[in-house]
Image (cartoon, grey):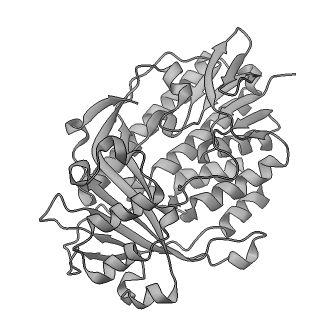
Amino acid sequence: MTPPILIIGAGLGGICLAHALRKNNIPYKLFEADPKSNFRTQGYRLRITKDGVTALHESLTPELFTLFEKTCAETAKMGIRVKPDGTPAPSKPGLGPPPQTMSGSVYTIDRSTFREALLASLEVEGNVFFEKSLDYYTIDADKVTGFFTDGSSEEGALLVGADGVRSRVRKQYIPEYQGIDSDMRIIFGKTPLTPGFLAKLPESHQQGMSLVTDPDDSFQPTFLFESIHFPHADEVPFPLPSAYMYWCLLARTSTLPVSDEKSWHVTPREAADLSRYLTRGWNPALRSIFEMQDESQAAVRSILSALPEIEPWTPCSRVTVLGDAIHIMPPTGAMGANTALRDAGDLARRIVEAGGAGGLDEKIIGDYEAGVREFAKVAIGFSWRGGMNSFGLRAAEECERILL
């Protein structure tokens, strides 16, 4: 019997790959470092467009794809564009996903809801393992063995690093891999759409995906917000989130009242306080978004990216990577989740065409990884252009290179 495919990381890409393998009766095991009960403050709005939708269609059963559709929120159109003082700001292109990604159906998801729904159907088979953090792996002629920090190990036919920007798999597989620090940080948050909150917010602020920007002050934070509603909440077998306003606040590190090292470790409450500090002089209606937020849902993240031109590496028939583990990109083009799903769908397709993990070789994995680099180059370019047009990102070539 062929050993299973070991998937390290239960983010969206890892889960999509697991479903595709399950659908095609290919053995797999999915390992997640976090405990099952704690998904951290990562439950934010994502947009799934053409390439992500295609991957989900191929990876999920028809029943699960229908469930996915019913967990989605309404997809907003463009909203207002104002300055921090509430006066109109000039419009220019660049806000939202690139037009090339918007053909066909577009879905708006709550990340935590989507992740939990798809994980539930995998867990019943006993192939999902939480609190399993990879330490390192070894390769033999006919297998790969993953060693975990709890002292356990697992043998497989292929090990897939879907474990995000700090990927342990990538660090061993491509140890000199470089990326970019944009010198910007992003605060994510949610504000419940309660009657009290809506009473403080003009009607124009309650509809669409809106942007707050000051073209005359490059050090002023940029702010995006969008109301999230779930029209099919009564059609799914589990509770969906109550309506909320999703928002993100982008600021340069030099404007933060904390050290860069500290910004990596702030608590949700500290992140919420930081958002209020950075917007302390803003229009009162906009301020209400921060004042009435759910403080447990705030989080600070660095805006990092892979290089637009990802250097090739020597492929291995027993190890590969997908998603943010290999091509993290700024969230300013709505491309990150779609690119991870696209990777998962493409890898699964190649595994199926090879007759399962036992048929994989360096050429098949190398061709997959070449496709990852080619697609990521386009997606990273979109993300940087969107970030430069609407969110104040500097050009990629002006930013510091770092080891990821």
Residue 1, visible in the rendered structure: yes
Task: Please state the horizontal and vertical placement of residue 373, each as a whole percent of the image.
Answer: 45, 32
Report the side of 337 relative to 213 (left or right): right
Q: Nearer the viewer, residue 286 or 2?
A: 286
Which residue sits at x=40%, y=58%?
A: 271
Q: Nearer the viewer, residue 93 or 211?
A: 211
Residue situated furthest top in the rendering? 141
Task: Please state the horizontal and vertical placement of residue 360, each as a whole percent of the image.
Answer: 69, 21
Work out which quarter of the rendered image holds the C terminus and state it: top left
Report the side of 56 relative to 193 (left or right): right
Q: Quadrant of residue 145?
A: top right
Q: Nearer the viewer, residue 200 or 138?
A: 200
Task: Please state the horizontal and vertical placement of residue 112, each as a whole percent of the image.
Answer: 61, 58
Report the side of 243 relative to 264 (left or right): right
Which residue sits at x=39%, y=70%?
A: 225
Q: Is residue 338 above or below residue 5?
A: below
Work out which quarter of the rendered image holds the N terminus and state it: top right
Task: Please state the horizontal and vertical placement of residue 114, each as a whole percent of the image.
Answer: 64, 59
